[in-house]
Image (cartoon, rainbow, N blue to C red):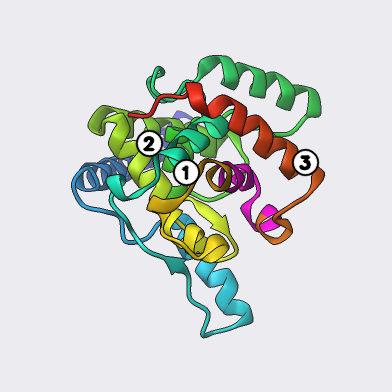
Amino acid sequence: MSAAVAPLRRWLWRAALLAALALLALQLWFFGWVLVWRWVDPGETAFMRAELARLQEKNPKARLSYQWVDYDRISNQLKRAVISAEDARFTEHEGVDWEALQKAYETNLKRGRPARGGSTISQQLAKNLFLSGERSYVRKAQELLITWMIELLWDKRRILEVYLNVVEWGEGVFGAQAAARYYYGIDAARLDAERAARLAAYLPSPRRYGRLRSSPYLDGRTAAILRYMPGTSVP
């Protein structure tokens, strides 16, 4: 019996070691890209690739609307609006708002499935850069690890700059410049408070709200964002 068990035990140890090494290699790969993107602007993200593939299933010639603009060429009104809407404690926390995460966990526990995320801007950026929109605790754990890497290597200004440039703002529309051009025909630098608040209101579900553009919910959410914006600080 022992003679039969010993080879199996060795095989299991080797399999576990290989799995651990593969996981470590994956984390180093993430860390390497986060380090590079501290100085180099990302050309695309995991979310962009997934959206382009989806669009090209319907139309092989489909392209994304995306143009990078530097931090200073994005309206401060949009920065305030997005922080107000998505992560009010962005400049204070270290990547994770544990209170919001606890509330999300309790909500998901009651529902019996992961639905609410409780994600900060840093966490959303980690997901957009590398991961998928799948809702699972495994994906959430990886998101937290990448968030830690981002917060370790980047300052808040860089985090917000990259987020505003890569976040999805409608079907095939990514980044503040593309969104400002698509919805209003102006550059991101020229967004006023009301237009910025409206764009921030789209973010929870940009494909849906970007098509609607106006509804009682969107109008109310825009008004709420506008109220909070004056007291919101930006990095």
Q: Nearer the viewer, residue 138 or 8?
A: 138
Asked whether the viewer can see residue 14, the reply is: no
User: Of the residues under marks 2 and 1, which one precedes in the sequence?
Assistant: 1
Mark 3 to mark 2: distance in Å? 33 Å
- Residue 205 on the magenta segment: yes
Q: Nearer the viewer, residue 37 or 113?
A: 37
Quarter residue 85 falls in: top right
Q: Which residue is under mark 2?
A: 146
Whole-percent x, y for residue 21 in the image: 30, 40
Q: Nearer the viewer, residue 188 or 158?
A: 188
Q: Nearer the viewer, residue 82 or 123?
A: 82
Instruction: Choose mark 3 or mark 1, whichever is in front.
Output: 3
Whole-percent x, y for residue 50 in the image: 52, 63
Q: Quadrant of the C terminus?
A: top left
State the SS at label 1: helix
**Residue drawn at (52%, 16%) of the image:** 98
- Are the residues at dot 3 and dot 1 in contact (C-beta closer than 8 Å)? no
Which disc number belongs to residue 127? 1
Say above or below: 105 vs 22.
above
Magenta range is 197-209
Q: Mark 3: which amino acid?
A: Tyr
Q: Which residue is under mark 3?
A: 217
Label 2, residues with CA under 10 Å away: few <14, some 14-19, many ≥20: many
State the SS at label 3: helix
Principal secondary structure, stretch drawn in magenta: helix
